[in-house]
Image: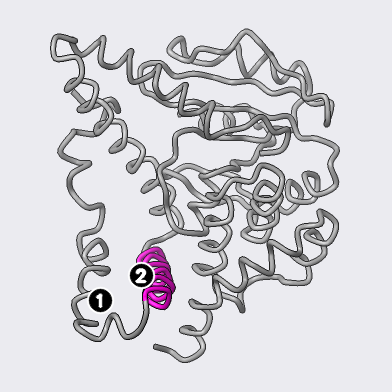
C-alpha cells in the first residue's frame, strides 16, 4: 500500500481530500487519495523509484502557478484508483494544517491526517472557491459527527475570516445545528 | 470479477455493518404516520433534517478508521454498478474491455467533479 512506502521512506505527508472528511464525517465514495507532501527533489525521486511497477506515474508533473508547487498523479490501472500528490505550499493555512496534522491509523497502518478543524476550514475554502456542493455537505457532516462542543471554534473562525468564508461557515452551522440541538436535548 | 482485488462482488451488496445500515429504515418506521405534518416545504425541510440526523447517528456508531474504509468500499461498489451498466450496453465485451471502459468513464467523471485547484 502506498502509505507503507511513505512511512518506510520517513516522508512528511498528510492524507487530505475525501479520506480526511470521511475520517471525521459521514463516509462517501472515495475515488482517489489526495496527499500533501513536504519533500525535497531527491526525496521525490526516491519515492518514485521504489513504487511498484503496477503504479503508473503520470510523466507530466504539473506546476501550480498560484502556489509555485508541483502536483503529480499516480494511476493504479489494475484497480480504478488514483493517487494525487501535492507539494506542501507556502500558503499560511496549508502550513498550519500540516503542522497540526495527527498520526492516526488507516487499514492498520500509521497515517497522518489533518485535524477536523482543518478539514472544515479547507472544505469551506473549496466550497466557496470551486462552488462544489459536496464540500458543503462534507463540512456539515464533519460538524455534525464531531459535535459542536468538540471543535476549536476560535481556530476555525480565525481562518474562515482570513479566507473570507465566514458566510458559508454560518450556513453550514445552521445545517449542523439540527444535530447539535439533538445532542443538547439528548433526543 | 471484482474491480478491486481482495473484495468479492458480493461484499458490495452486503452492508458493512448491518445493525447500522438498517438504522435509518427503523427510525423511519418508528416515526410512522406522524412523519408529514404540514405543507410540502415543511416536509422537504423535515426530511432533509431527518436524513442528516440519521446519517450522523450512523457515522457516530463507526470508528474513524471504519468510516475511511467505508469510503473505499462505497467506491468499489459504485465501480461494480458501473460495470454492470457497461455490460448491459456492451453485451459482447469481455472482462478486460469492461474494465478498460470503466477506467475511461472514471477519468471523465473525475474531470467533471474535480476542478483544478492548487490546495486539495
**Spatial separation of the CA atoms under disc 2 and disc 1:** 8 Å
Q: Main secondary structure of the magenta part?
A: helix
Assess whether residue B45 is covered by the magenta stretch.
Answer: yes
Q: In what element is the residue under mark 2?
A: helix
Q: Position of residue B109 (x, y in %)?
A: 46, 28
Label 2 belongs to which residue? B54
Q: Quadrant of the C terminus of chain B?
A: top right
Q: Residue at x 54, y 62 (%)?
A: A142
Near mark 2 (Cα within 10 A), the count class, few <14, some 14-19 or many ≥20, is some
Residue lying at 78% horizontally and 60% vertically, measured from the top left? A160
Where is residue B45? Give x, y as percent: 44, 73
Q: Residue at x 79, y 23 (%)?
A: A40
A41 relative position to A108: left or right: right
Q: To which residue does mark 1 refer?
A: B27
Question: Which residue is outermost to the bottom?
Answer: A185
User: Does the magenta run of residues contain A14?
Assistant: no
Q: Measured from the top left, where is residue A127 in percent x and y?
A: 65, 50
Amino acid at each position: 500500500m502506498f502509505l507503507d512506502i511513505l512511512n518506510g521512506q520517513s516522508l512528511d505527508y498528510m492524507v487530505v481530500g475525501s479520506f480526511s472528511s470521511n475520517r471525521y464525517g459521514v463516509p462517501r465514495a472515495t475515488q482517489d487519495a489526495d496527499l500533501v507532501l513536504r519533500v525535497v527533489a531527491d526525496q521525490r525521486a526516491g519515492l518514485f523509484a521504489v513504487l511498484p511497477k503496477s503504479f503508473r506515474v503520470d510523466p507530466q508533473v504539473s506546476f501550480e502557478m498560484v502556489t509555485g508547487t508541483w502536483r503529480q498523479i499516480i494511476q493504479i490501472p489494475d484497480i480504478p484508483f488514483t493517487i494525487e500528490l501535492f507539494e506542501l505550499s507556502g500558503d499560511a493555512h496549508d502550513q498550519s494544517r500540516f503542522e497540526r496534522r495527527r498520526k492516526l491509523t488507516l487499514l492498520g497502518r500509521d497515517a497522518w491526517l489533518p485535524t477536523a478543524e482543518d478539514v472544515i476550514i479547507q472544505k469551506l475554502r473549496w466550497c466557496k472557491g470551486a462552488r462544489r456542493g459536496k464540500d458543503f455537505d462534507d463540512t456539515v457532516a464533519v460538524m455534525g459527527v464531531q459535535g459542536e462542543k468538540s471543535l476549536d471554534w476560535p481556530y476555525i473562525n480565525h481562518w474562515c475570516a482570513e479566507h473570507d468564508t465566514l458566510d458559508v461557515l454560518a450556513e453550514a452551522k445552521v445545517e449542523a445545528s439540527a444535530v447539535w440541538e439533538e445532542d443538547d436535548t439528548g433526543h | 470479477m471484482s474491480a478491486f482485488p481482495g473484495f468479492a462482488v458480493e461484499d458490495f451488496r452486503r452492508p458493512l455493518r448491518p445493525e447500522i445500515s438498517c438504522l435509518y429504515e427503523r427510525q423511519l418506521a418508528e416515526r410512522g404516520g406522524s412523519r408529514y405534518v404540514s405543507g410540502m416545504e415543511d416536509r422537504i425541510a423535515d426530511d432533509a433534517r431527518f436524513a442528516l440526523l440519521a446519517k450522523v447517528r450512523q457515522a457516530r456508531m463507526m470508528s474513524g478508521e471504519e468510516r475511511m474504509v467505508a469510503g473505499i468500499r462505497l467506491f468499489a461498489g459504485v465501480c461494480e454498478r458501473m460495470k454492470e451498466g457497461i455490460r448491459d450496453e456492451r453485451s459482447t465485451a469481455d472482462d478486460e474491455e469492461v474494465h478498460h471502459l470503466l477506467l475511461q468513464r472514471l477519468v471523465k467523471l473525475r474531470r467533471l467533479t474535480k476542478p483544478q485547484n492548487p490546495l486539495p
